[in-house]
Amino acid sequence: MHYPAVLLLLLPGGAEAFRICAFNAQRLTLSKVAREHVMDIFVRILARCDIMVLQEVVDSSGSAISLLLRELNRFDNSGFYSFLSSPLLGRNTYMEKYVYIYRSHKTQVLDSYVYEDKDDLFAREPFVAQFTFPSKVLPSLVLVPLHTTPKAVEKELNALYDVFLDVSQRWQSKDMILLGDFNADCASLNKKRLAELALRTEAGFRWVIADGEDTTVRASTHCAYDRIVLHGERCQSLLSSAAAFNFPRSFRLNEEEALNISDHYPVEVELSRAAPRVQPLGLAALLLLLLLLLP
């Protein structure tokens, strides 16, 4: 039997993963985060992420985020956290913000804008941001968050494709992550209508939070409301993992305690900093493999 002179194995790049998260914080206010046990859990959730996109931030003063950042920077001294906030967004008296919280020693904001919703398709139009990304494969990455209203999920998610086109033209980049509480399941959007969305029928979009995933805290519900969608070959080549983070289980909270934080789980995607590459086996491993293959 003959063996090739060099055997190759497909090995991961070995670089540290970069975690991007989205979390519907369920009416985040100063009075909510001022409660010690609530603040403790929020800080521990945020400290898992290199970039976190918070939704349902309803504190108009900005004090809630300032307090969160102060406690987060005290809790995690591995590097400083900063934030980027949208203005209050909404149609009537009820308004929300999107807030990015990010490790500023790992990434920086390059640009951002609120999508111009000329036809008033969104209850809360996306607040798009472009970040530096610590990878030679992908030096920058665009995030497009959306919190849909349950009454118009299909309309808003189809309009999100137009946001993708707008971002692609504005920044000449197709590597982006669309993420947030899409309300994309159960009574808000059935499987047939989900399959007909432009983000499902157009090529190049990869939904990394599965349709069968549960992103809700209540035991009485099992819905994949919160989603992460990747677009772009370079972005998708770096995908390491994606899942909902079951914080009640991780932090040993009962349902009542968990609902003081949110009725949603955060969703997360991990990107490696280098695409998988082919490497030669080390000499010791090569000799061991040859011995195993000998008759």
Image (cartoon, grey):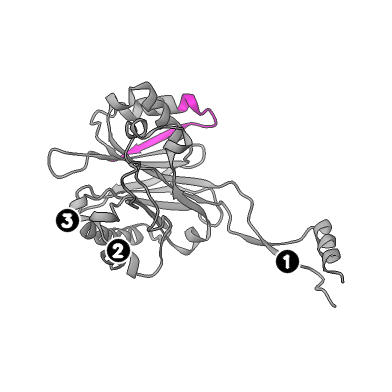
Left or right of 259 on screen, residue 75 = right
Disc sitting over residue 8 in the figure: 1
Residue 249 in percent (x, y) is at 45, 38
Left or right of 136 on screen, residue 56 = left
Residue 53 placement: quadrant = top left
Q: Distance between the residues labelled 1 and 2?
A: 43 Å
Residue 292 in percent (x, y) is at 83, 64
User: For mark 2, what is the residue?
Assistant: 191
Task: Identify the secondary structure beneath mark 1.
Answer: strand
Q: Which of 218 and 58 is in front in this view?
A: 218
Is disc 2 in contact with disc 3, using a CB cutoff of under 8 Å?
Answer: no
**In the displayed image of the protein, which residue is found farthest to the left?**
92
Sequence order check, earlier mark of 1 and 3: 1
Q: Residue at x 84, y 77 (%)?
A: 2
Q: Which of marks 1 and 2 is in front?
A: 2
- Residue 277: within the magenta? no
Is disc 1 in contact with disc 3, using a CB cutoff of under 8 Å?
Answer: no
Q: Which residue is drawn at 82% across and 74% down?
A: 3
Query: Quick check: can you spot residue 257?
Result: yes
Disc sitting over residue 118 in the figure: 3
Task: Identify the secondary structure beneath mark 2.
Answer: helix
Quarter of the picture containing the C terminus is bottom right
Residue neighbourhood size for the residue with mark 3, other residues' Cα within 10 Å, grouped as few (<14), some (14–19), many (≥20): few
Q: Give the range drawn in magenta.
A: 73-86
Q: Which of marks 2 and 3 is in front?
A: 2
Task: Identify the secondary structure beneath mark 3.
Answer: loop
Q: Nearer the viewer, mark 1 or mark 3?
A: 1
